[in-house]
Amino acid sequence: MRKHTAGQAAALRLVDVAERAGVSIATASRALSGASGVSAEMAERVRAVAAELGYVANVHARSLASGASPGVGLVVHEIGDPYFAEIASGVLEVADAHGRMVQICHTGRDPYTEVAQLRALVNARVGIIVVAGSGHLDPDVQSQMKAQVQGFEAAGGRVAVIGRHPQLGVDAVVPANVAGGRAIADHLLGLGHRRIGVASGSRRLATMADRLAGVEQALRAHGLTLDDLPVVEAEFTLDGGKDAARRILDEHPDVTAILALNDDMAVGVLSVLGERGIAVPGEISVTGFDDVVVAGHLSPALTTVHLPMKEMGRQALELALLPRAARPRRRTAEQQLMVRASTARVRG
């Protein structure tokens, strides 16, 4: 099959793709937009035909022709989590400067809800989608996410992600999670802590895998591994932090520090320690990760890893506003260790 020239591509219509693929116009439209009701095999066939013909159903052009700028869809795991709230503020700031409305979708940290929300945004005919939050390492979830993203971009949309999203192949702003994990663990180890409990989210999240990899690097430099520490997986939330803290304290009462892999969990850890009358940092040091606005105003103020979350949101939308590049662009959001009052040298 011969690909058309640019001039011919401009004259192509959806009906041409449908006829060549041997499907109805409605089916071709759903396949190219990533909507439901079309099998993965059929959708792939229609996209392949569109690519061969050089057809692009440009959602940006359609919106501009109607006098409106394409909207922006923002997908977050948990809008109540300060991490995502700060990212959202950065996205909203850039969107406002460009006269674009933002539709925010909340997944509740369910990977299949995330896929469904992507589909809903495609059907809502937004021109840009920003996916904020960790990528999922489950192959089935990755495959479904990739199909939605490819279909949307084939129809002229733009996608950017915040975090490591394996195999999506789109522009990304990637936090320095490995370096941050290493920095926070190095800090505790440098204070003499060796009996460290780790409050972690699910290891099926790329963010957790990366932060734990950084912790592992620091431990190995001191002759330890993660297998030597109690690592408790729980929900990546304040309540999850409480659950992890209770398990660590009940099963490993000799810990001298608890390293929580996000600030929300760290707040939960501090709450449980307060309930049990355990002094921080006199008896147990506590660390977080992200440096949400409240972290420096807790009592004691939280030692944590700072990520520029609002700037990450800004950069992601700015990338998505650019024309698609031959290769996905990547921006690294650097980390900074913030040493505050919640950590101290190990007793004795």
Image (cartoon, rainbow, N blue to C red):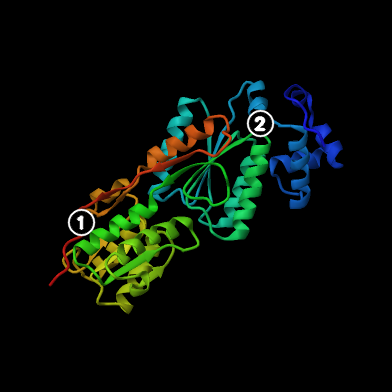
Q: How crowded is mark 2: few (under 14 residues within 10 Å), some or many (20 or more)?
A: many
Horizontal and vertical percent for residue 306?
Answer: 31, 47
The amino acid type, in three-letter code, at marker 1 is Pro
How much space separates mark 2 and mark 1, taking CA atoms?
50 Å
Labelled pair 2, 1 in contact (Cβ < 8 Å):
no
Q: Is mark 2 on a helix, strand or loop?
A: helix
Residue flagged by tag 2: what amino acid is it? Val
Q: Which of 137 and 65 is in front in this view?
A: 137
Q: Which of 192 and 288 is in front in this view?
A: 192
**Which quadrant holds the C terminus?**
bottom left
Foreground mark, 2 or 1, reads 2
Apparent side of residue 10 relative to residue 337 in the rendered image (left or right): right
Q: Which residue is denoted by mark 2 in the rendering?
A: 59
Q: Is residue 47 above or below residue 56?
A: below
Which mark, residue 215?
A: none
Residue depicted at 17% across the width and 68% down the height: 346
Whether residue 287 is visible: no
Residue at far left of view: 348
Residue at the image point whose x is 76% and y is 36% from the top: 52
- Which element type, helix, strand or loop, lies under badge 1? loop
Q: Quadrant of residue 58?
A: top right
Instruction: Give the x, y percent position of residue 134.
Output: 48, 52
Query: In this rendering, is residue 295 above or below 241?
Result: above
Question: Residue 172, image x and y in percent?
Answer: 49, 42
The disc, 2 or 1, on the residue closer to the chain's N-terminal end is: 2
Packing grade of label 1 (10 A; few <14, some 14-19, many >=20) is some
Residue position marked by numbered label 1 in the rendering: 300
The residue sitting at 81% across, 33% down in the picture is 2
> Between 64 and 22, which is closer to the camera in this rendering?
22
